[in-house]
Image (cartoon, rainbow, N blue to C red):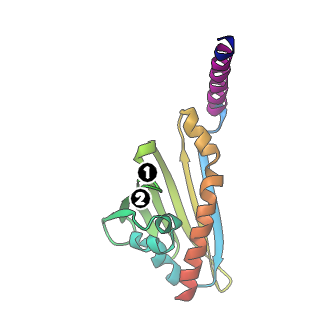
Amino acid sequence: MKWFKRILIGLAALALLLAAVGLALPSQFRIERSLAIAAPADSVYPLIAAPAQWQRWSVWNQRDPEMKIEYGGPAAGAGARWSWQSETEGSGKMEFTDAVPGQLLTYRLSFPEFDMESTGHLRIEPQGRGVRVTWSNEGDMGMNPVNRWFGFFMDRMVGPDFEAGLANLKRLAEAS
């Protein structure tokens, strides 16, 4: 019985340590990736400014072809929004909050299941004979130590999805 008590005390100490470290982690996270695309901004922007186009290049949509999607607001630009439900990718909402054709798209992303919101940007900047697209997302994980651990690993978890999405965007824009 003593060994069981020691295991419980050890597990409790480990949980307290993880919570304390979690509280010491930064609450803010930021993810950013960029990619050069050999296509004009006029070919890239329509692919990012319309929620329905994200299905063509976002890896999250490609991972779950059964994802249930609803669109609202205008078809593209500021005010356009979409929500999704997915068994594998989770459920969320995205609303485009600012749009400058050929230059910038800003969105608000929320995952109600996790009580998490973030802000993202897709910036299009001229570069050589094409453009550089920079995709960023940032948010605050609040005081929850579990969420802060999640935020700590966010770049490693989501960054590769941004890279794959940008590669798909590049393929589509350069083919048009």
User: In the rendered view, does 158 fall on the left or right side of 67?
Assistant: right
Give the dominant element type of the magenta stretch: helix, strand or loop. helix
159 versus 11 height, above or below: below
Quick one: 79 or 110, which is closer to the camera?
110
Query: In the rendering, at what x and y percent does residue 115 appear?
Result: 44, 42
Front residue of this view, candidates 10 and 71: 10
User: How dense is the environment of label 1, judged by Cα within 10 Å: few (below 14), some, or many (20 and up)?
Assistant: some
To which quarter of the image does residue 18 belong? top right
Q: Position of residue 20 (x, y in %)?
A: 64, 27
Amino acid at circle 2: Met
Residue at disc 2, secondary structure? strand
Which region of the structure is painted magenta? Answer: 5-23
Circle 1: residue type: Ser
Q: In this view, does 63 lie to the left or right of 24?
A: left
Q: Which residue is drawn at 50% across and 51% down?
A: 118
**Which mark is on residue 73?**
none
Would you place residue 6 above or below residue 101 in this image?
above
Cα–Cα gap, marks 2 and 1: 6 Å
Residue tagged 2: 94
22 inside magenta stretch: yes
At label 2, counting other C-alpha atoms closer than 10 Å, the crowd grade (few under 14, some 14-19, many 20 or more) is many
Q: In which quarter of the image is residue 143?
A: top right
Q: Residue 165: x percent and y percent? A: 56, 69
Which residue corresponds to mark 1?
Answer: 110
Determine if residue 23 is in view.
Answer: yes
95 vs 51: above or below: above
Task: Please report the residue visible at 62 percent of the width from the left and 26 percent of the height from the top.
Answer: 15
Which residue occupies the extreme front position in the image? 1
**Residue 97, position as x, y percentages in the image:** 41, 60
